[in-house]
Image: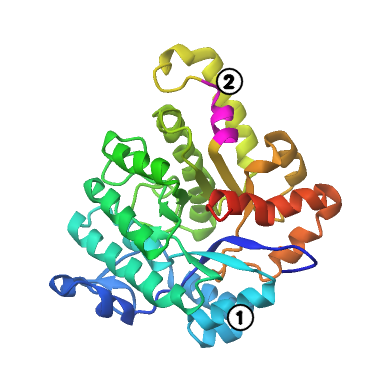
Amino acid sequence: MLNGYRIIDADSHVIEPPQMWSKYLDPEFEEFIPSLDMKIKGASITHKISPQVQDVGNQQMMQAHPQAYLNRYDPESHVQSMIQMGVDIAFVYPTYGLWLWAIDSMAPEVAGAFTRAYNTWLFEEFCSYDPERLKGVGAVNPHQPEKMVSELHQIIKYGGKAVFLRPNPVKGRLLSDPAFEPFWSECEALEIAVSIHEGTHSQLPTVGAERFNSRFALHACSHPMEQMMALLALIEGGVLERHPKLKVGFLESGCGWLSYWLWRLDEEYENLHWEVKDNVKIKPSDYFRRQCFIAVEPSEPYLAEVITHIGVDNFIFGSDYPHMDHQPDAIEKLLKLEPQLSQGALHQILWDNPSHFYGLS
C-alpha cells in the first residue's frame, strides 16, 4: 500500500535463473538446455540485440534495485522490491521465456518442454515463496495449439488465474487462427484472463524488425504496433464476438495508441462492415470496452483524456519490474496525477480493475 492506495502490479517479471532449465526440463530435451549466455546449441535465442544494449540494460537494472540485482532477482528480493514500491500483489511474467517461445523455427515439442519447465518452476518454486503476494501468469505453447487446453488445466491446478501470449504470429498463425479456438473457449468458460505481452528482439515476425537494427527503433515499433495488430486480429477474426466473456489485457505498450486505433477501426467498420459482418457485429471500440484491459504508463501525455474517452474501467497498471526501462518511482509518478485523474480513478486503475481482470474479486 502507498499513500492509502492498495496496489496490484499487473505486469512484473522474473529473471529466470539459468539452472532452472537443467532442473525442470524433461530429460529427453537435455540437449536444448540454454547456455549461460542464453544460446541453444550455439544459436542465440534473441534477434538484433547488441552487447552494448545488454551492458546498458544490466547497468540500469542494477541501479534501479541494487539488492535485487545482487540476489539475482530471487523471490525474496522480488517481494522486498514490491514493499519498497508500495505494491501489495504482483502478477509475474517471464523474461527469457518471452524469447524462448518466440523462436518461430523451434519444434513444437521442444517449445512444449520449455512450457512445462517454466510453469513448474514459476508456480512450485518462485511464487510458492509468498503465494499471497506473488501471482504467476502461466505459459502456454502456441507452437502446438492442440496442447494449449491441457496446459491451461495444469496452470489452473497450480492456482494460476491468467496466461500470456505473444501478439506476433507463430508459425504463420494469428491469434484468430481456428487452431486456437478451443483455447479461447476454455479460457472463457474457466474465466481465465489472457494477457498479450510483446518482447523486443524476438525471432518471430515483428513490426520494424526487417527495417531497423537499433533497439531505439525496434522497441519503439514492437510493443505498440504488435499490440495494435493483436487487437485487430481478435476483433476481425471474431474471437471477441464468439467469446463475449473472455477477458484480454494488453500490456507494456502504453495506452496512447488506443484512442486512435479504436477510432480508426470504427471508421473502417462503418464503411466496410459488410465485409466482416460474420465476425464483427458491433463497433470495434465496443468490443474493447466490453472485455479488454490496457496498462497505462504515468509519463504518457493526455493520459487523463484517453481514460475519459475510453472509460476508466478498462485501465490497469504494470511496473515492468525489473527490466531496463522499469522506473522504480513509476507508482509515485502515477499517484501524482491524482488531481487530473481523481482518487476514484486511481483506485480503479491500481486495484479494482486488475482485481476484476485477474479474477481476484
**Secondary structure of residue under mark 1:** helix
User: Mark on residue 3?
Assistant: none
- Sequence-earlier tag: 2 or 1: 1
- Give me the residue at 43% from left, 16% from top: 277
Q: Residues within 10 Å of mark 2 (few under 14, many from 20)?
A: some
Quarter location, residue 163: bottom left
The residue tagged 2 is 267
Amino acid carrying label 1: it is: Gln
Quarter location, residue 106: bottom left
Camera sees residue 47: no
- Give me the residue at 24% from left, 59% from top: 112
Total numbered circles: 2
Camera sees residue 346: yes
- Give me the residue at 47% from left, 73% from top: 54
| Whole-percent x, y for residue 346 in the image | 75, 53
- The region drawn magenta spans 282-290
The residue tagged 1 is 80
Q: Main secondary structure of the magenta part?
A: helix
Q: Indicate whether residue 304 is drawn in magenta.
A: no
| Whole-percent x, y for residue 30 in the image | 17, 75
**Secondary structure of residue under mark 2:** helix
Q: Which one is in front, 283 or 70?
A: 283
